[in-house]
Image: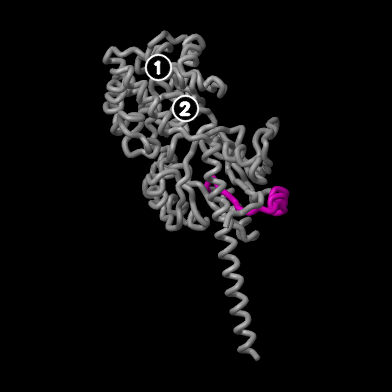
Amino acid sequence: MVLDKKISVLEAMDVYLPDVDGVINCVNNYSVNLSDKTSLTVMCPKNRKDYKDEFPYKVVRCKSIYLPVLNQYYGLPQQDAQFKKQIMSGNYDIIHVHSPFGMAKYALSVAKKKNIPIVATFHSNMRQIFESIFKSKSFSDSLCQNLGKLYNKFDEVFVCSPQVEEQLRSYGYTKKVTYLPFGTDFEKCEQVEEFSELANREFGIANRELVFIYVGRVMKLKRIDFILDALKIVKEKNIKFKFFVVGKGAELASLKKYAKKLGFSDDEVIFTGFLPREQFPLLFSRADLLLFPSIYDNFGLVKVEGASYETAGVFIKDSCAGCDISHGVNGFISDNDVESFAATITDAVKDYDKLKNIGKNAKDTLYISWKDCTDKLLGEYKRIIEEHKNRSEISDEKLKKTKKVKTNDNT
């Protein structure tokens, strides 16, 4: 049975806008596209005092603490009585959790009190994060098992691929998973050549000059140093290029120094820092290859963004970010070492026409809009709400029968 009414959804995040990362991007795009189809609220932490929410959906913020190591504000929902009162006054049909920490635990308590279904999306490879922080595999494994116990408290969990499901299962998760894709707010571009010419003028690029690009947070887990090591080998083969690192983060200063140490000039490796999103189409259209060797990302939204502009990517074999990539068809797959990554780049750029055709295949096979992703999500919400309602009715009926039997026994 499909629900006909406009459902009420509560999304939960431990960090949120104006801080930016892939998960925040995902939640905001879900929320924007759900705002006219549902009654939607996002509960998240307060950010800097001068920031004002201007969204087409409702945002309820709780007390927070600033974490310098992440350069983000982290929510403290249990310590905010006014926030809890506001959340509990709402009538929700389902809760959707996107981060597995304090807000997740609070969301579980809300779902229990209100007797409504609660689901989660498994976004990030926390094992990689834990190992980078604590430098202990055994301790990191223990933390992951604790997260597995947390995820087992949800009605079900959404993942984007079989590889990510396998990762979640390794945490000890035993319940149902549902596959849901991630998309982009960019439309399929039909003006790639025009945007490429604009990029040439805007960023000082010569015609037919090779352009590589990385887009995302500048952090150690993204392995930008790995890219630089590979490009040093490419440069030694007398292949000329420009490599644009688009984004900001804690590693920006150290990576600039590392690029200099490897002998790159400012004209070869360009750290753009933050760029307005409206400039992304120019660089994506102009780029010959997206370089994304991350084994941390469970998807990598930039893969779909690049595909929107016919830019194929180079990914690591068996990585979650490389799922849906067929080598030499809609992208490129490299072994997880610098020499292999360099060789893959070198082979990819040998045939310009073939490379451009692979980029077009990426657009044809990888592209999906956030609107289409959200329509799929909304269908799953309605299914889960209906299943929860049916289970509750069965439980109520069993309880009534049990009470009736006890009453008859007593008489």
Please name the residue shown 72% across and 53% down the image: 89
Q: Residues within 10 Å of mark 2 (few under 14, many from 20)?
A: many
Residue 211: numbered disc: 1
Residue 166: numbered disc: none
Q: Quadrant of residue 229?
A: top left
Circle nearer the N terminus (2, 1): 1
Residue 310 vertical placement versus 176 (above, below):
above
Residue 149 vertical placement versus 221 (above, below):
below
Q: Quadrant of residue 32?
A: top right
Task: Find out whether residue 15 is within the magenta segment.
Answer: no
Spatial CA distance of label 2 from label 1 is: 17 Å
349 or 126: nearer the eye?
A: 349
Looking at the rendering, the stretch of residues picked out in magenta corresponds to 81-100
Q: Position of residue 329 (x, y in %)?
A: 32, 30
Q: Is residue 142 visible?
A: no
Q: Position of residue 233 (x, y in %)?
A: 29, 20
- Nearer the camera: disc 2 or disc 1: 2
Residue 308: numbered disc: 2
Instruction: Please give left or right for residue 146 compared with residue 59 in the image.
Output: left
30 or 270: nearer the eye?
A: 30
258 or 296: nearer the eye?
A: 296
**Could you tell me the amino acid type at mark 2?**
Ser
